[in-house]
Amino acid sequence: MRYPQGGGLTAERQQFREELRLKAAERFARGEASSVIARDLRVSVRSVQRWRRAWDEGGPRALRSQGPASLPRLSQEQFATLEKELAKGPAAHGWEDQRWTLNRVKTVIGRRFHLTYTLQGVRKLLVRGGWSCQVPARRALERDDDAVTGWVKETWPRAEGSRRPVEPG
């Protein structure tokens, strides 16, 4: 089970799943049916069958947790350095506008740390570090914020009020 924001199972959840697999291994040794084990452990029969195959090939050791699927390739210190680089802004790294894109962050990582990331890997790295995707608001150059505020306070309530149904009298 993978989660989009966390990158995988928590350590506690990994431990829980490993314990389930090891309980199943004890029952494999007793010759119990996969469907009975699945029902009792509240998992799918397919999972139990997959665990049984691994157990047949490698014994209980094959059912131990393998640890996290992937570890961040940048250390905490390197990520802190990356954040400092990003705080300098895109102009400090040679781009004309003040907009960070995944491709630009990927380029900074490559230049600074000599590591290659995919765009999806850069996104996951930034999300793990607490960053979020933001899209700048597009506004017309002619926009007059004072006029908009006045319209919202004065004109809109009158227009909204006129749409209320008239009660029969």
Image (spheres, rainbow, N blue to C red):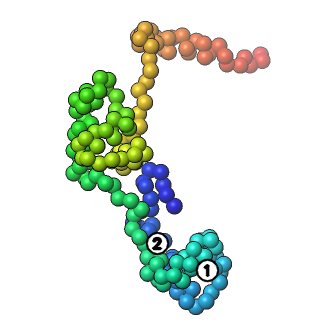
Which residue is depicted at the point 51% across and 82% down? 57
**Front in this rendered view, residue 70 or 162:** 70
Q: For residue 69, which quarter of the picture? A: bottom left
Judging depth in this view, the residue of 107 and 80 nearest the camera is 107
Q: Amino acid at mark 2?
A: Phe
Residue lying at the far bottom in this picture: please name it: 30
Gap between marks 1 and 2 measured at Cα: 16 Å
- List the residue tagged with mark 1: 37
**Picture quarter containing residue 75?**
bottom left
Contact, mark 1 vs mark 2 (Cβ under 8 Å) = no
Is 108 or 87 nearer to us in this picture? Answer: 108
> Disc 2 marks which residue?
16
Which quarter of the rendered picture does the C terminus lie within?
A: top right
Q: Secondary structure at mark 2?
A: helix
In the rendered structure, the answer to whether residue 4 lies left or right of residue 169 reads left
Mark 1 surroundings within 10 Å by alpha-carbon count, few (fewer than 14), some (14 through 19), many (20 or more): many
Residue 117 is marked as none
Mark 1 or mark 2, earlier in chain? 2
Residue visible at 21% across and 51% down? 77
Q: What residue is at 48 percent from the left and 71 percent from the top?
A: 17
Question: Please, what secondary structure does the residue beneath circle 1 have?
Answer: helix
Residue kind at label 1, given as amino acid type? Ile
Does the image show residue 33? yes
